[in-house]
Amino acid sequence: IIHAVNCKTETSIFKTNILKNKFFNFSFLVLLGLILAVYFVPSMATLFSLTTLNKIQWAYVVLTSISIIPIVEIGKLIINKKR
């Protein structure tokens, strides 16, 4: 989900208004809600064979999720300098 936010513009995510596209933001929130529902609703977690995560594991999830941001931002810099 984080990567989708970063890829929705060719300019830096830090130089654009990421809240401008209301449809994208709505779909982002719906998708986030669905993912959280699968994790936190016990019957859905069982259906998807999920287990609970400890704080360290959540830290890995968050860090790996946001690690794509600087990678894509560097790619955007390189591409925009070639133009």
Image (cartoon, rainbow, N blue to C red):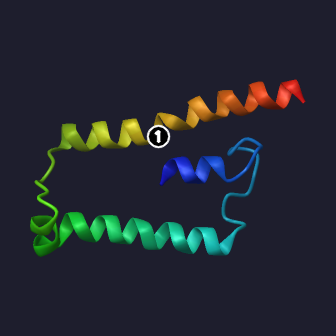
For badge 1, the amino acid type reads Ile
Q: Please state the horizontal and vertical placement of residue 49, each as a whole percent of the image.
A: 11, 59
Q: In this view of the protein, which residue sits in the foreground, 79 or 62? A: 79
Residue 80: quarter of image: top right
List the residue tagged with mark 1. 66
Q: Is residue 6 left or right of residue 20?
A: left
Residue located at (13% from left, 68% from top): 47
State the residue lying farthest toward the right: 83
SS of the residue under disc 1: helix
Residue located at (43% from left, 68% from top): 31
Q: Please state the horizontal and vertical placement of residue 71, each as a whole percent of the image.
A: 57, 29
Q: Please state the horizontal and vertical placement of residue 14, each as a whole percent of the image.
A: 69, 44
Residue 38: quarter of image: bottom left
The C terminus appears in which quarter of the rendering? top right
Q: Is residue 60 left or right of residue 16?
A: left
Residue located at (59% from left, 69% from top): 25
Q: Please state the horizontal and vertical placement of residue 33, each as a whole percent of the image.
A: 37, 71
Q: In this view of the protein, which residue sits in the foreground, 55 or 73? A: 73
